[in-house]
Amino acid sequence: MKPLSECQIAVVGLGLMGGSLAGALTQSGYRVSGVARRGETIREALERGLIVKGDTDPLVIVPAADIVILATPVRTIIDQIGDLGSVLRPGCLLMDLGSTKGQIVDAMQRLPESIQPLGGHPMCGSEEAGIVAADPDLYRGASFILTPLERTSAEAVEWGTALARSVGAFPIVLDAERQDRLVATLSHLPYLLACALVRTADETTSLDPAAWRIVAGGYRDTSRVAGSDVSMMIDILQTNREPVLDAVRALRAHLDRLTEMVDRSAEDELRAALSACRDERRRMFS
Amino acid sequence: MKPLSECQIAVVGLGLMGGSLAGALTQSGYRVSGVARRGETIREALERGLIVKGDTDPLVIVPAADIVILATPVRTIIDQIGDLGSVLRPGCLLMDLGSTKGQIVDAMQRLPESIQPLGGHPMCGSEEAGIVAADPDLYRGASFILTPLERTSAEAVEWGTALARSVGAFPIVLDAERQDRLVATLSHLPYLLACALVRTADETTSLDPAAWRIVAGGYRDTSRVAGSDVSMMIDILQTNREPVLDAVRALRAHLDRLTEMVDRSAEDELRAALSACRDERRRMFS
């Protein structure tokens, strides 16, 4: 493999995640080209200096790249791994930015032997979407999970690690199953909870317009991620179903226990349980 | 009643909410005295200029005040309404800052006839607690719910409204039952959800320390209020039990419906439900 600094990088998908990554890599001195479905997106990415070259046809961009990063929704990534695998140049590192990794590494497993596959999941984002929201600083300070396959070489993992560091992120190497379980609890469950909370509040606000005026900070924060991009979230939920369902079951058990203590006015138990939550929350973000 | 500007105001309880309110009222030109359990708290409130006079004994402060504001936890407020009712001067306006209002207005109903009672619930706060966290700007921009009783005079409601405005808040007059139902969904439910989420994540993190490093923004926001003061929250949950239990039941039904769509891979239904949540969330905070 050639030195990373001499590599041509192609980012496929120039939405929030791909556009931001392209911009960050360009700022770090890499030569980055981009693929998007719409010519308008390419033009904006070029105008903003996020990429130096772009096209709506991946076949114009991808075969020339040493590193290809798929930054589309999870199930599109899975299709693209199959579609683009045969046009990648030998020795190419194929990465992705999908939030669930099990089905993606399964698809990567079927790539030609000459390709180095490496799953990636940067733990950053926003409720904004699209190239208009792209921000080269988005990755700064974020954890960047890397999920190598057994066939992935140590050098390919090093490239991925260096790429993550070059955009200001902290690489963490995990296997795909472990990452999928962790993000089910820490990311997909909070999303479903936020949605259920919004639906519950919606009932209340339909009955009483005053709710709109008194909506509390707790609600605002707890419901924030309900504003996330729906297509992206459906891909995530559908490709991580079992871990997500397990996480919901675990949460329901805890919610039932807390609610039952409130119902019984079991104050000592409630105090112990809520204090443990408070301490745990503080420990996690201290 | 005398002009509001000539009124002496006493704040009982100088924690985050009381200390902040005392400071904001002092900044607005009112003469504010304070009561706290500990002499140290009084000294800090005097040093920081939040109050001009203070004592650990309410009997030294409260009988001289034209307006008394109880800023202690809900069940302490209920006790204090009974204890202090007979020492208030005739014509005194007795307010409070408790988060639940049903049991408080019940207690206020039993005050001597010469007293004007007015429930209050400012929709602001933070996970910080105590006089050290007091901030005269805390109320700025917040909604300030006022719950008058049938016996409360229009002039007393006007005083409460003017007080709320003078600290930068927006007064909203609601009856106690309606406010308790609304905050059960918009404030107490998010708290219980945050606690259940922290307990669920705690199981995961106990099994896998990598969770600490990848904890996502969604989790951070959704769990934030789990760091709230436990004694305050237990008072709130115990004095608003039925509305809170109803809100949890409504949420569980929505969570079950969403989860069941994920389980069945019912994508069209899921897309419709999640899109409605996204739109509703955006509408609420646009």
Image (tube, coloured by chain):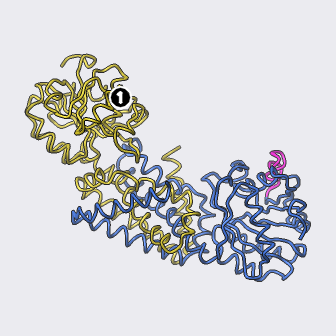
Chain colours: A blue, B yellow
Residue B108 lies in what quarter of the image? top left
Q: In the rendered image of this protein, does residue B72 appear above or below residue B113?
A: below
Relative to A225, A27 lies left or right: right
Mark 1 is surrounded, within 10 Å at the Cα level, by few (under 14), some (14 to 19) or many (20 or more) other residues, namely many
Residue B185 lies in what quarter of the image? bottom left
Q: In the rendered image of this protein, does residue B86 appear above or below residue A278?
A: above
Does residue A198 appear anywhere in the picture?
no
Q: Is residue B29 magenta?
A: no
Relative to B247, B242 lies left or right: left
Q: Position of residue B77 (x, y in %)?
A: 20, 43
Chain of the residue under the numbered disc 1 shown in the image? B
Residue B168 lies in what quarter of the image? top left
- Which quadrant is the N terminus of chain B positioned in? top left
The residue to which callout 1 is attached is B23
Residue at 23 percent across and 20 percent down: it is B7
Callout 1: SS? helix
Q: In the rendered image of this protein, does residue B245 appear above or below residue B74?
A: below
Q: Position of residue A149 (x, y in %)?
A: 72, 79
- Main SS, magenta residues: helix
Span shown in magenta: A38-50
Front residue (pair A39, A12): A12
Q: Amino acid at mark 1?
A: Gly
